[in-house]
Amino acid sequence: MDRKSPNALLIVALTITTAIALWGILDPAGLGRMAATAVAAQFNSRGWFIMLEISGLLFVALYLAFSRFGNVKLGPDDAEPEFSTPAWIAMLFAAGMGVGLLFYGAAEPLTHFETLRQFSGDPMAAGLALFVTYLNWGFHAWAIYGVVGLVIAYFAFRRSRTLLLSAPLVEALGDARWVRGLAWMFDLLSIVAIAIGLAGSLAMGVFQVQAGLAGLIGVEDPGTLTIPVFVAMCIAFVIPLRRDLSEGMAKLSNTAMLIAIGLMAYLLVLGPTSFVMNGIVSGFGRYLFNVLPGGFSTAEFFDHTIVDWFQGWTLNYMIWWLAWSPFVGIFIARISRGRTVREFLTGVIVAPTLFSILWFGIFGGLGFFDALRHDGVLSSINSQDLDATTFALLDRFPLSGITRTATILAAFLFVLTSVVSAGFTLAMIGTGGDENPSPRLRTIWGVILGALGLAMVLVGDIALVRSIIALSAMAFVFIVPILVLCLFRSLRREVPK
C-alpha cells in the first residue's frame, strides 16, 4: 500500500483515541469510575492468570538468553548496533519507566510499609515493603518489555518484517484473511494501549512537577499550576518530535538519567549511608532468592485489605507494563538492531532492574529511616499526598532548592522522552511500520497524546488514572502469549552455530 494513501488503521486509531480524550475531558469522573469498576471485575476473575503469564515471560526470557538462540543476531549476522551501549540503555530505561521512578521513589515503599505494618512488626514490614517494590519494578516488569521487544526486533530485523505487533502473526501463521484481520486488530489495540498508557505517564509527570514547583516558588495550592505545567510540557515535546530520533530522544534521555544518577548519589552520601546500604544489600538478597516464587503470588486467603492492596499495586503494575509493552517493545526494538538475543535480553532486563533496586533502595531506605528512627513525618505526608513525598524527602537535606529543581527538570525530561518515543512509535504503526515516520505525523500524534494527557489530568486521581491504563491493556493478557508462540515457531528455523 502506498503510505500516502488513506490508511484505515490510522483513521480508526485516531478516531478512537480522540473519542476517549473527549470523554475524559468532558466527563473525567465518569471515565475514571467506569475504568475502576471494569478493572476490579477483571482482577477478581483473572488475577491468577495475569501473575502466571508474567512469571512465564520471565522464564521465557531466561531460556532464550541461555539457550543456543542467545547467539542469534537481531538482523543479518554482520549487523552492528546503531547506538552505543550506555546510550542504548539510557534510552530504553527512560522510555520504559522514567517519571514513575521519581513519583514513586519514596512514596511506594512507604505506602507498602504502612499497609504491612498492620500485620507484622515494623522492621519486618519495611523489608517486605522493599521486596514488593522490587517485585513491582524489577525483573518481571522488564521481562515483559524484553520479550515483547525481542519478538518485534527478531521479526523486523531477522525476518525483514515491519516493526509492528502484527508482523509475527503474518510471518508465523501465513497471509490468510483471518490472520490479516487478527493482525490488524493487534496493531489497533497496541495504538490505543500506547496512547492511553503514555497519557497516564504524562498526567503523573504533571502532578509531580506541579508539586515540586509549588514548594519551590511558595504556592500554597499546587492545583493552580496544573494547566501552566501541562501547557509547558506540551510545547516542549513538539520540538524533539520533529527532530531525528538520535538528536532528540538520545540527548533528552541521557540528560534525564545523569540528573537521576546524580540525585541518587547525593542522597546516599549525605543521608544515613550505612542504614541505606544495609537495606539495599539485604533487600537485594531477599529479592534475588524470592523473586521467582514472588511472581506467583496471588494474595490468596487474605482479607480484603491485603487483596485490595495487592490488586491496586502489584496486579495494576503488571497490567501497566503490559499496556506499555507495545510502545516500549517497538521503541527498544527500533534502537536494538545488530545486538544478539542474549545481549538484548541482558541489557533490557538486568541493567534497568539493578538501577531500580538502587533507586528504590535509597529513596525507600530514607523513608524507612524517617519512619523507624525519626519522627515519621514522611509517612504522614505520604498518606495524604503521594505527589509531595519525594519533595518532602528532599527538604530534609541541604540545598533542597537545588535538588528540587533537579528533580523537577528530570521529571520534565522523562515525560518528554516518553512522549517523543511514544509519538514516534504511534506514527510508525500508523504508517505500516515506517522506521522513520514524517515529523508531521509524529506531531499529530503528539497533539493526540496531549489531549489524552489532559483528560487524565482532569480525572485528578492517580488511582483512577492507573485503572484507565489497566483497562486499555487487558487485551494484551491474551495477545502477548500468541506473540511468544509465533517467536518460538520461527526460531526453530535458526541453524545452530
Image (cartoon, rainbow, N blue to C red):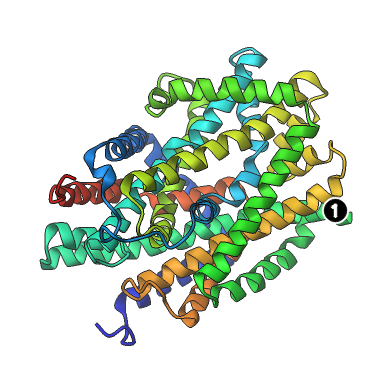
Q: Position of residue 288 (x, y in %)?
A: 47, 24
When the figure is inspected, residue 107 is found, relative to residue 16, above or below; the finding is above
Q: Position of residue 460 (x, y in %)?
A: 64, 54
Q: Quadrant of residue 58?
A: top left
At 71% from the left edge and 39% from the top edge, which residue is drawn?
A: 265
Specify the quadrant that holds the C terminus.
Answer: top left
Q: Amino acid at mark 1?
A: Leu
Residues packed near mark 1 inside 10 Å, few (<14), some (14 to 19) or many (20 plus): some
Specify the quadrant that holds the N terminus.
Answer: bottom left
Residue 460 in sight in this render: no
Question: Of residues 438 and 370, which is closer to you in this image?
Answer: 438
When the figure is inspected, residue 197 is found, relative to residue 108, above or below; the finding is below
Q: On the picture, is 432 further left or further right than 379?
A: left
At 24% from the left edge and 59% from the top edge, which residue is drawn?
A: 158
Q: Which residue is mark 1?
A: 216
At 51% from the left edge and 25% from the top edge, which residue is drawn?
A: 306
Q: Position of residue 124 (x, y in %)?
A: 61, 15
Question: Of residues 324 and 50, which is closer to you in this image?
Answer: 324
Q: Quadrant of residue 298?
A: top left
